[in-house]
Image (cartoon, grey):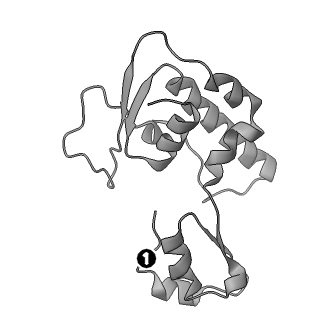
Amino acid sequence: ATIKDEDQMLRALDGNVKIIAREPRSYEYVKKFLPARNVFLADDLALKIPEYDSEVSRMRGSKPSEKKVAYMFRTDIEKTQKHLPKGNVDLSAKLDGVSWSGIAHSDVDLKMRVRKTVREIFSIMINYTEVWTDRLHMCIADSLMDRE
């Protein structure tokens, strides 16, 4: 999501906080409030998943023989569809997912949670030739799976 209208919060951050923006608009906005050495612009790390998980790389080439469409639109407060298509499944709402809040365990625990969630998403998407969604990470997964 684009970072905007967060002037007060950004001004209150300590000098040890670093922010990685995923698009130029957020990057330029955050640079107004933090030292340049603490603000970075980088691709979403989800784009790198196949490089780090051979299981996901293996799934990439698999496609169903018949055309099969999935609808995976948001159902939460940020939903964009007033009327959801029949059979819609919001995977992000159904899966445990990975959240930075409440993580009191090791990096290994976090990596295992990320891997589990990614593999669950890919193992569902492997069944479709086409995916319609309004969630960024579902779009990225769809693209990585070489779906329409």
Compare residues 146 and 32 and report the one nearer the observer: 146
Name the residue located 49 percent from the left edge and 29 percent from the top edge.
147
Count of numbered circles on the image: 1
Instruction: Give the image location of residue 125, x and y in percent.
Output: 51, 27
Name the residue located 51 percent from the left edge and 83 percent from the top edge.
9
Q: Residue furthest left?
A: 83
Look at label 1 and name its amino acid. Answer: Lys
Q: Is residue 148 visible?
A: yes
Instruction: Look at the picture and state if 85 lies above or below 69.
Output: below
Instruction: Give the image location of residue 48, x and y in percent.
Output: 68, 46
Name the residue located 41 percent from the left edge and 27 percent from the top edge.
130
Instruction: Give the image location of residue 99, x and y in percent.
Output: 59, 53
Give the residue pinned by disc 1.
Answer: 4
Mark 1, other Cα within 10 Å: few <14 / some 14–19 / many ≥20 = few
Compare residues 73 and 43 and report the one nearer the observer: 43
Say which element carries label 1: loop
Name the residue located 67 percent from the left edge and 88 percent from the top edge.
35
Instruction: Look at the picture and state if 132 lies above or below 10.
Output: above
Q: Residue furthest top?
A: 65
Instruction: Look at the picture and state if 98 lies above or below 95.
Output: below
Q: Quadrant of the C terminus?
A: top left
Q: Is residue 17 visible?
A: no
Compare residues 53 and 93 and report the one nearer the observer: 53
Direction from residue 17 to residue 27 in the image, left or right: left
